[in-house]
Amino acid sequence: MVSNSLTTKMQQKFAPSQIQYMKLLQLPSASLEDRIKEEIEKNPLLEEDDQQTKDDTSIEIPRIKTDSNGKVSTKNVEKKTEGFKVDPGSFNAQENSMYESLLEQLGLVDLTDTEYEIGKEIIGNINENGYLTRTVDALADDYFFSHSQEIETSQIENVLKIIQSFEPSGVGARDLKECLSLQIKRIKQKGEDINLAKQIILSDNLFEMFKNKQYTQLLSKLSCSKSDLEKAESIIRQLNPKPFSGSEGIYENVYVTPDFYIWNNEGKVEFQLTKTFNKTVKLSQHYVNMLDDLKKNPKKKENKEAIAFIKDKIDSANEFMLSLQRRDETLVKVMAAIIKFNYAYFLDGDITKLKPMRLVDIAQMTDNDISTISRFASNKYAQTHFGLFQIKKFFSNAVEDEQGNQISSDTIKQALSKIIATENKQNPYPDEKLVELLKGEGYVLARRTIAKYRDLLGIPVARLRKTIN
């Protein structure tokens, strides 16, 4: 039996101007100029303001002065801008270089416009180790939000397979097994040891046994000798579990354009917002004058159509210019809040002074929602007097020790990594010993907390860190 019923539900929709603002907010400064040029090409009512042109190496940027109380004052200053050279092997340089490399490889593939945009979305969500951090479903949602177009998850899977064929081998994998599988499938050499290694990696059960070093069970399942298994293990260990690491040579002369400059000026933290474009935008006076002329005889059919067209483009241009202004205001406001929250850290860059800071903390301080802060932190860099950092690296969760003190998770991770890096691999430290060693450095934490952060660092338990004799 068919029945009719009425239901009501609330659905949030963003205005086009809000979507445009959020897209601009997410862009790093290095990409903003291209976006502005794209808008000028698309909208004839927008043009570069030649009167605001500076020389090629000089730009006007706001200097922000802050103190430990968070007081902010602003004035415009002129600063010579140069690319900041990143040392070969630098984490940030690698990530930036690899991102550009993947985009270049994407451009060499015969793709539709939609497939190319999907590829850019996928590449933008590959982390510093070369792994895809978003699910296919989440990427479909992201694409709909950013392009106002629905796509099938199968389209994303198809483009992902293409990206997984790029260099470095293993890039775009969603977990360790997929990463190693992508690499070992490319090995063309023949041999029993190669076949055995492939068999181990491509089988869920055998790979779990291998990860857990259950060699007796492996020998039984594979019906092979210990010598054959050792050869297969040697091949697997030559694969790279982190595709973005281990190729420092290609990162020479890599330049990253910072979105902010932060420095210590005689005990006070100051920062500047970078603008990489040298010209501002304005409404085209030619079309404004044309509109005035058309309004003198508005009843003519062709005039009506021209007036409607120009008015529509003026509205679009004004929305774009307002979004640019809102972007800059938000960037300044949020960075000022970040510095205020971790003022002691920004004075000298001592990571032990870095207080746990969450997206929600800065959202509350700036009266923004968490998604806005997340977009702010995405793909942006800050050049400080103690190094070049991704903005998102300033955020970390809190760890509470047994005495109730709040410690940044980054501080714990750094201390934990140093201890494990120097351990005897023939007799690695169990978690109980790690608790004791960290306590000696002033971090009183429970064993389960240590285990949690060891897992987040991708460091296995002691028995799996032990090297085979």
Image (cartoon, rainbow, N blue to C red):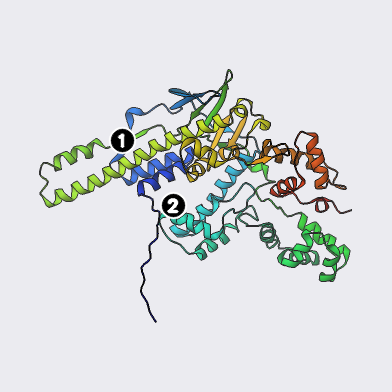
**One can see residue 199 in this view:** no
Q: Percent position (x, y) of residue 421?
A: 78, 41
**Residue indicated by mark 2:** 146
Name the secondary structure under disc 1.
strand
Q: Residue at x 38, y 65 (%)?
A: 7
Determine whether 82 is above or below 98 in the image.
above
Q: Is residue 416 left or right of residue 182?
A: right
Q: Percent position (x, y) of residue 240?
A: 71, 52
Which of the two residues, 423 or 112, is positioned nearer the viewer here? 423
Q: Percent position (x, y) of residue 275?
A: 45, 32
Q: Residue at x 71, y 48 (%)?
A: 452
Which of the two residues, 175 or 412, is positioned nearer the viewer here? 412
Q: Which mark is residue 282?
A: 1
Mark 2 or 1, nearer chain start: 2
Q: Is residue 405 left or right of residue 307?
A: right
Query: Which is more foreground, mark 2 or mark 1?
Result: 2
Q: Percent position (x, y) of residue 2?
A: 38, 79
Give the residue type that dot 2 points to: Ser
Which of the two residues, 25 or 224, is positioned nearer the viewer here? 25
